[in-house]
Image: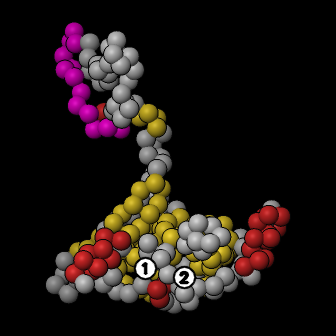
Amino acid sequence: MAIGLLGRKIGMTRIYDAVGTMIPVTVIEAGPCPILQVKNKDAAGYAALQLGFDPLPERKLTRPMAGHFKRSGAQPVRCVREFRIDDLDGYQAGQTLEVSLFQVGETVDVIGRSKGRGFAGQIKKCNSSRGPMSHGSTYHRRTGSLGASADPSHVMKGKPMAGHYGDGRVTASNLVILEVNREKNLLVVRGSIPGHNNGYVMIRKSKKAARKAARKA
């Protein structure tokens, strides 16, 4: 259970360290994120903060959305997500979380939706090997045997086959923060993150790092 921010992927670039080594980085616009709702275990069954990102004109709101934003006293936003956390102390609806939540050198997990590739065959989608390409072969880029006969008489779940490729939730774990720009609400993290430029992402404090620190303690 880790607190975080909502943001937008700006794109990738490169920076150089003190000895001239090139480091690939991703620039993320992180926050500011108003707290729209504080959910506790008594009312919702779990503890979480509902955050918003990216201002939305009021003329584009439906009445239920307008009422929800009015109760929190926050400006309407396009993107709404929840972060489950253990301790709700110090958080209240209408409060704004900013990029100062993170520090240089800290590790984070970035969650986004991968780029959609449409309908793809088994070789592209599952990295399968093709058959012989010589003349007379009836097995080139086909799926091949599905491995089921009279028993159990159905294709086993998880069988690599052609289908919808991409456009799924992906988490990039343990990315190191190299720079925090509080004036422009920017985070610079080492490596790549899922999704296309301008896609919404969730940035949370690394769960693996927190568990590792807890074990050492």
Q: Quadrant of the C terminus?
A: bottom left
Label ID, residue 112: none
Which residue is outermost to the top?
136
Q: Horizontally, is 194 left or right of 73 in the view?
A: left
Which residue is pictured at 83% across the width and 64% down the height? 63
Dividing the picture into quadrants, the one containing residue 15 is bottom left
Which residue is pictured at 80% across the width and 70% down the height? 67
Q: Is residue 199 magenta?
A: no
Q: Residues within 10 Å of mark 2 (few under 14, many from 20)?
A: some
Percent x, y of residue 47: 55, 72
Region rendered in magenta: 125-137
Amino acid beneath label 1 = Leu
Q: Is residue 129 magenta?
A: yes
Q: Horizontally, is 55 left or right of 109 in the view?
A: right
Percent x, y of residue 3: 47, 77
- Residue 6, relative to residue 166: is it above or below? below
Q: How is the image coloured?
A: secondary structure
Q: Horizontally, is 65 left or right of 7 in the view?
A: right
- Residue 29 in view in this figure: no
Q: CA distance from mark 2 to mark 1?
A: 25 Å
- Identify which residue, 90 or 144, lies in the foreground: 90
The residue where tag 2 is placed is 88
Percent x, y of residue 102: 42, 84
The residue where tag 1 is placed is 187
Which residue is pictured at 50% across the width and 81% down the height? 87
- Identify which residue, 71 or 202, lies in the foreground: 71
Percent x, y of residue 91: 58, 85
Which SS type dominates the magenta stretch? loop
Amino acid beneath label 2 = Leu
SS class, disc 1 = strand
- Identify which residue, 145 or 89, lies in the foreground: 89
